[in-house]
Image (cartoon, rainbow, N blue to C red):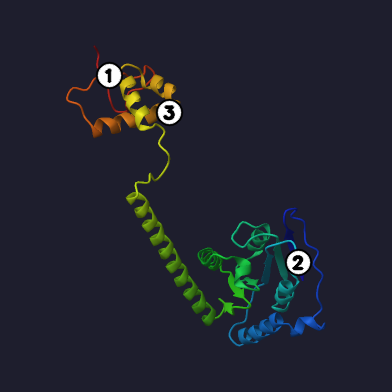
Amino acid sequence: MTFIGYRYPTNQPVNHRRHPCHMTRAPYSPAIRRVRSSQRTDSNQTTPAGMRIGYARVSTEEQNLRMQTDALQVAGCERIFTDQGVSGADFCRPGLDAALEHLRPGDALVVWRLDRLGRSLTRLVDLINYLARREVDFICVMESINTQSPGGVLVFHMMAALAEFERSVISERTRAGLAAARAQGAQLGRKRALSPTQSKQAVQLARTLPLTEVARRFSVHPRTVKRMLLAHSSASPSPDPAPLKRSVCEAPTKGTRRRNS
């Protein structure tokens, strides 16, 4: 059994001591009984051919990984990767990255509980789909999820349907919030580079000065001034607009030819 641990914030390996199975706590704990029960169920359905790689995580430095690692050891994991002191909302973890890198086609990633892998259902489904594309199975001990068996695949598809429903609900709430904000007159998107007063001043200056000079005075890019002028001319065209003064360094548009005067 190999333990590879990552502890935050120092990222130093965690020194895990193996817990012998003949001791009192291990075989009679609820986690171990659940593991052995799931092992008997899985043995009647499938025969895993690859290596089982375990992953354990706790959110704070004060929490102990011992219960998870004991359960993963009984589940048949040959190597166990851990993250200590990291939130489940963050999927960028050194222990998880190392576990995913170690997996090969035919292997299985084993976790004690689903929330030890992550707390976002959408991200969990994406991760399990990623494992399936790599021909890697997924086993969750406490929730009895095992993609090596037809029942486990069915549970995963139900999770995927719930994740899709979660995406739809979030998208609907986002659209409703944006519509309510627009109805109240809120300005969405990035803040405008020029205020309405500055835009009017830039229009007046652009009739006598090059765009680069106007942009320098307002501390913006010349393209910003040009887009603002085009929007202003399309919104309120004048019958006899004065020509805008171009910069001497502004190159002609591609595809146009200069006329000989």
Mark 1, mark 2: which one is toward the viewer?
Answer: 2
Rendered residue at 38%/29% (across/down): 223
In the figure, residue 96 lies in which quadrant?
bottom right
Circle 2 — which element? strand
| Distance CA(mark 3)–CA(mark 1) | 26 Å
Residue drawn at (40%, 26%), measured in percent from left and top? Answer: 222
The residue most toward the top is 261
- What amino acid is found at the position of numbered circle 3 in the picture? His
Q: Nearer the viewer, mark 2 or mark 3?
A: 3
Which residue lies at the image location 34% right of the left edge and 20% below the top edge? 205
Q: Residues within 10 Å of mark 1 (few under 14, many from 20)?
A: few
Left or right, 99 with reference to 182: right
The C terminus sits in image quarter: top left
Q: Secondary structure at mark 1?
A: loop
Viewer-proximal residue among 82 and 58: 58
Q: Position of residue 178 (x, y in %)?
A: 38, 53
Q: How far apart are the alpha carbons under marks 2 and 3? A: 55 Å
Q: What residue is at 43 percent from the left and 68 percent from the top?
A: 165
Image coords of residue 163 (percent x, y): 47, 68
Image quadrant where residue 179 sits: bottom left
Quadrant of image for the N terminus: bottom right
Amino acid carrying mark 1 in the image: Arg
Q: Which residue is mark 3?
A: 221
Give the residue number, with chain letter if any, for mark 2. Answer: 3
Q: Earlier in the sequence, mark 3 or mark 1?
A: 3
Q: Within 10 angstroms of label 3, few (less than 14), some, or many (20 or more) residues?
A: some
Q: Determine which residue is flagged by label 1.
A: 258
Establish if 202 lies above or below 164: above
Which comes before the other along the chain, label 1 or label 2? Answer: 2
- Residue 103, by quadrant, is bottom right
Total count of labels? 3
